[in-house]
Image (cartoon, grey):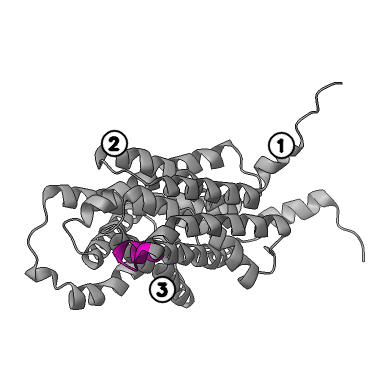
Amino acid sequence: MKPVPSEQFDGKREEAPKLPGTYAGGMIRTVMNRSDWTILLILAGIWGAAFIFIGIAVRHVPPLTYVWLRLAIAAAAMWAFLRWKGVGLDLPRSAWGSILLLALLNNALPFTLFGWGQTHIASGLAAILNATTPIWGVVVAHLFTADERMSPRKLAGVLLGFGGVALMIGPSLLANLGSSAAAQAACVIASLSYALAAVWARRFRKQGLSPLTVTTSQLSAGALLMLPLMLLVDRPWAMAMPPLSAWASIAILAVVCSAFGYVLYFRLIDRAGATNALLVTLLVPPVAIMLGSLFLAEVLAPQDYAGLALIALGLAAIDGRLLSLLGRRPRPAV
């Protein structure tokens, strides 16, 4: 076969028709650049503040109703944004099953568990437990993917992280099996659900779905999933009207923390991969703890901070970049 010159091949490639309705994303980077870190820091601020607004909302609105309102308002905001941009959803019918499972794992289940959990524990503690998401992510990725297997370094990080969780939940379990221990366990299960969702979301890049499409469809599916459960359990027509502070908190959670936040999150997954995107949960607890102490007068126990330190060490071991930097530090001259 006669070889084709490279310039002729490139010209033919440019002339080839593009597949309709697909999202042209770039190659995933394993090492994040400056723009990726900017997105990560913005997300940390948004989702750190989210725990404060959740704490305010669930004081006046039952968790199931709060979750449905958050998802429904966020979905409406995304549909309005798509209409303003003049673009459609571009979601193939075959993808709706995957989207429904993503909505369950990434929205309906963890939002409900964190909402209920924060009726019994401080927002800062909930944020610390949320930081176990990347640790769960290592376990889930090892079990369900072929390219993210467990290594000794990652195993050490997982053990450190789970040690931090045990340190925080242990005293509550030893004292009694009351609401505090159950609420902390609910937050840990919610974090596992987030990790499952992050691994599940890897498939949408291969399907050519943009972050806008994934965000809009998962929020819409989540609102549909929560509607019958909310009506059956909470019976919102029999509730007193929540105060303005609760409505404002839910609106901020919906538009800023869910709609805008998930667009950034899926864009980060699309650009830097799920493992890098999950690092945001390491940055969320300090933000939530600071805001909780400033605006909600929350005080955490010493073992909570010790648990956060163990989780942070575990995440540093899993990520590996801090350890590699320390390993490359030049030795002093003798």
Q: Is residue 52 left or right of residue 184?
A: left
Q: Which residue, as the protein is rendered here, is positioned at the far right?
A: 1
Q: Secondary structure at mark 2?
A: helix
Does residue 191 appear in this view? yes
Q: Which residue is mark 1?
A: 326
For label 1, the crowd category at 10 Å Cα-Cα, with few meaning under 14, some 14 to 19 and many 20 or more, is few
Q: Which residue is mark 3?
A: 100
- Based on the picture, tell me whether residue 3 belongs to the magenta stretch: no
Q: Nearer the viewer, residue 51 or 156?
A: 156
**Mark nearer the N terminus (1 vs 2):** 2
Q: Amino acid at mark 1?
A: Leu
192 up-or-down from 334: above or below:
below
Q: Which residue is mark 2?
A: 294
Q: Residue at x 44, y 73 (%)?
A: 101
Q: Which residues are magenta?
A: 175-186
Q: Nearer the viewer, residue 149 or 99?
A: 149
Q: Quadrant of residue 221?
A: bottom left
Q: Is residue 146 left or right of residue 116?
A: right
Quadrant of the rendering where the C terminus is positioned: top right
**Mark nearer the N terminus (3 vs 1):** 3
Instruction: Name the mark nearer the viewer: 3 or 1.
Output: 1
Tell me where residue 161 appears, x and y as whole percent. 55, 55
199 up-or-down from 48: above or below:
below
For label 3, the crowd category at 10 Å Cα-Cα, with few meaning under 14, some 14 to 19 and many 20 or more, is some
Q: Are marks 2 and 3 in contact (CB under 8 Å)?
A: no
Q: Secondary structure at mark 3?
A: helix
Tell me where residue 95 appears, x and y as whole percent. 48, 73
Quadrant of the rendering where the N terminus is positioned: bottom right
Q: Mark 1 to mark 2: distance in Å? A: 35 Å
Q: Residue at x 69, y 42 (%)?
A: 323
Q: Amino acid at mark 2?
A: Leu
> Magenta span: helix, strand or loop, mainly?
helix
